[in-house]
Image: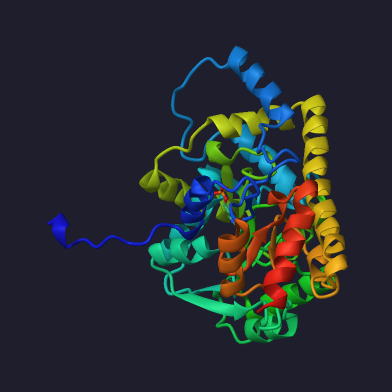
């Protein structure tokens, strides 16, 4: 039976990792993979995480199952981090947290939850969006639709986005990136979030906010502006949160599905559905990452250390954005690429064409996704001139 199954191309990013690893050029630069890198090019374990792990090693007494919703202490900690400790939604018992295997796991839970409990509802994704969104929601059997986000001139096209949202059928789900939009790096301003809220209310849409980069844009609370605004003014919403980036827990698969209902009773109803979805997918989430996050967030000292580390990562990325634009100055390109300093998060849509990306790879061993998305955190200060010179060469000879 297997002989009729076709081989499919592997993930573009994984292919990029292979090509990068095989490249023997000592000057090579990896701007492809979506992980944070420090000035030495490493993705280190955070100091707060190491300390929490040391404490867990002493305290842990069992490896028994943790249940479909995961560790309740983790759920409480994530709810406070995402919605704000003083959120009235928490006091009213309107929010449910289900620990998940990464943000990806939370997205799949959300997708299945929608498919089963809101039959017939379509989902609207930004164009472009994180490619895995398409795969996850399609695999769950949802009808995918797109709303415009970045235009052909590589700018955020908010009027087109809003005009599209105003046409969406009542009750459909709209997926919004809370901050650090992946892949473009273009985020909504506060005023734009306010306008999105009005349309969501008017059309009675259900927002699903993907919050994978809390703390990587402007700050842990600042990045939550859009999420908290919607949560405060709407009866119902879905949030998927990830601790992969801000806790550096990528491989520990640590995320959370947050469901908000009109009242406590309805929250318990939808929460029971989330448990079934989790159970049918993987039964229980992995425990270790969530235990680390709860350990950190329950200790004032570790929380402070972690907050400082998030600030360090954010400042490095935002500093690199400006330094990169400055490095392009001698080549007369700083104005053309000035938007990179305004964008937020690890990624930027550079506006480079697939052909220019290919030339960067073939002639300069600089690796990025063919859409022109670059991981800014993959740059290091001493390589900025090399990257700027190469970009100037491929842009000018295009
Ligand atoms: C937009 C977005 N959502 C969700 C995720 C999920 O991350 P993870 O499953 O590693 O927590 C990512 C990771 O790259 C992302 O970029």
Q: Residue at x 67, y 42 (%)?
A: 78
Q: Is residue 153 visible?
A: yes
* Quarter occupied by residue 389: bottom right
Q: Residue at x 61, y 87 (%)?
A: 167
Nearer to us in this view, 379 or 289: 379
Percent of width and height locating residue 96 = 60, 48
Looking at the rendering, in which quadrant would you find the C terminus? bottom right
Between residues 5 and 328, which one lies in front from this camera angle?
328
User: In this view, which residue lies farthest toward the top?
Assistant: 58
Q: Viewer-proximal residue, 1 or 232?
A: 1
- Is residue 201 in view from this perspective? no
Reply above or below: 205 against 247: below
Asked whether, in this view, residue 294 is left or right of residue 281, the answer is: right
Left or right? Give the position of 2 relative to 84: left
Q: Provide residue 326's location: percent of width, then percent of height.
A: 87, 61
Number of callouts: 0
Coloring scheme used: rainbow
* Residue visible at 68% across and 45% down in the picture: 36
| Front residue (pair 158, 279) | 158
- Give the image location of residue 219, x and y in percent: 82, 50
Q: Is residue 349 left or right of residue 145?
A: right
Q: Is residue 323 above or below residue 134?
A: above
The quadrant in which the N terminus is found is: bottom left
Q: Position of residue 337 (x, y in %)?
A: 79, 71
Which residue lies at the image location 53% right of the left edge and 14% below the top edge?
Answer: 61
């Amino acid at each position: 039976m297997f002989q009729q199954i076709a081989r499919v191309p592997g993930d573009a990013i994984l292919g990029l990792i292979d090509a990068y690893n095989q490249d023997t050029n000592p000057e090579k630069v990896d701007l492809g993979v979506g992980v944070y890198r420090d000035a030495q090019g490493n993705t280190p374990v955070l100091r707060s995480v190491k300390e929490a792990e040391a404490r867990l090693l002493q305290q842990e007494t069992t490896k028994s199952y943790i249940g479909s919703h995961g560790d309740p202490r983790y759920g409480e900690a994530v709810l406070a981090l995402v919605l704000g400790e003083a959120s009235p939604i928490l006091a009213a018992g309107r929010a449910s947290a289900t620990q998940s295997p990464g943000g990806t796991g939370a997205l799949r839970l959300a997708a299945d939850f929608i498919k089963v409990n809101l039959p017939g509802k379509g989902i609207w994704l930004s164009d472009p969006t994180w490619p895995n969104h398409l795969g996850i929601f399609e695999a769950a059997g949802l009808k995918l639709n797109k709303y415009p986000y970045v235009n052909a001139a590589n700018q955020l096209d908010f009027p087109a986005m809003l005009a599209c949202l105003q046409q969406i059928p009542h009750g459909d789900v709209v997926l919004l990136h809370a901050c650090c939009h992946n892949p473009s790096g273009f985020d909504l301003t506060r005023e734009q979030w306010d306008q999105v809220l009005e349309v969501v209310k008017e059309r009675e849409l259900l927002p699903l906010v993907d919050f994978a980069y809390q703390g990587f844009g402007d700050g842990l609370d600042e990045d939550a502006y859009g999420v908290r605004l919607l949560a405060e003014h709407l009866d119902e919403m879905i949030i998927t949160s990830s601790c992969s980036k801000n806790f550096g827990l990528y491989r520990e698969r640590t995320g959370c599905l947050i469901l908000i209902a009109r009242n406590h009773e309805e929250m318990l109803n939808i929460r029971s559905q989330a448990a079934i979805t989790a159970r049918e997918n993987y039964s229980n989430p992995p425990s270790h990452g969530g235990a680390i996050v709860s350990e950190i967030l329950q200790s004032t000292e570790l929380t402070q250390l972690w907050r400082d580390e998030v600030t360090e990562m954010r400042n490095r990325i935002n500093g690199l954005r400006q330094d990169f634009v400055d490095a392009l100055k001698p080549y007369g390109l700083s104005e053309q690429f000035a938007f990179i300093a305004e964008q937020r998060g690890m990624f930027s849509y550079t506006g480079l064409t697939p052909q220019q990306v290919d030339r960067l790879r073939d002639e300069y061993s600089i690796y990025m996704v063919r859409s022109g998305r670059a991981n800014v955190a993959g740059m290091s200060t001493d390589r900025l001139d090399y990257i700027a010179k190469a970009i100037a060469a491929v842009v000018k000879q295009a």
